[in-house]
Image: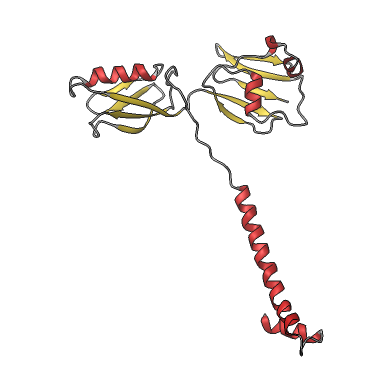
Amino acid sequence: MIFRLINDCRSLGLNRGVPLLLFLCLALPLLGQQDSSNAEGTQVERTQPKVDSISNGDTSEYLVGAGDVLNINVWKEPELSLGNVHVRPDGMISMPLIGGVRVGGMTVPQIQDMLEQKLQRYVSSARVTVIVSEIRSRFVYVTGEVRSPGVYPLLEPTNVLQVLIKAGGLSPFARRKSIYVLRNVDGKQQKIPVDYVKVLRGNGGLNVQLQVGDTVVVP
């Protein structure tokens, strides 16, 4: 390749007295390849998806549900401590010595108290700390003409406007007056209309409070 470049330079009359131009003839194609390689690397890096963990914050009043992940620490008892304990669909987990216990529908303080009482038979003055490391049981769904459709945790009272903000807002093609919430009630699906324009004007009565499992549809 280098010899071909030298011959190309000589054909242009650069065979004598012009070392700088000869260098440029050799270097510029290589620099172009390097820039192309760097550009491709940048493009790959930008297309890599971001994976964000769910921050559970203060979960003292949170009701643990199926799919949630717990970290359980028994003070001075590492063999009884467990990490990444998944709550089963029936709301149960398994603990050393005490076996299966139901934690679904309980708050973190209630789970700690219950485990301490059950461990008293085996460990004197048992002290248990429970942390909800991942919340997977309380979600709402946002689909349609929003910038970031997907699944969003419902850890506190949230209305349609608030979850649309979390989803990055509406796209330019969204039909603002045709937004609705799909909700399952006693096995039947309900369609609750939401007039986004009126909500923005302050008509709070149309700003639906979301429930676990709701789907916000933005046509």
Relative to 126, 19 lies left or right: right
Residue 78 appears at what percent x and percent y?
25, 34
Q: How is the image coloured?
A: secondary structure
The vertical placement of 155 against 1, above or below, is above
**From the viewer's perspective, is residue 135 above or below residue 10?**
above
Indicate the position of residue 213 as horizontal and vertical percent values. 55, 21
Name the one closer to the observer, 26 or 206: 26
Find residue 1 and report its image quarter.
bottom right
Count of marks overlaid on the render: 0
The one nearer the camera, 189 or 157, is 157
**Residue at left offset 78%, top offset 30%:** 173
Q: Position of residue 15 (x, y in %)?
A: 76, 89
Front-most of 17 and 87?
A: 17
Rendered view: 200 above or below 83 = above
Expressed as whole percent of the image width and height from the top left, the position of residue 204 reads: 68, 11
Determine which quarter of the picture holds residue 187. top right
Identify the residue at the far bottom of this view: 16
Q: Residue lying farthest top?
A: 205
User: Left or right of 195: which side holds 137?
Assistant: left
Give the position of the C terminus as an image quadrant.
top right
Image quadrant where residue 41 sits? bottom right
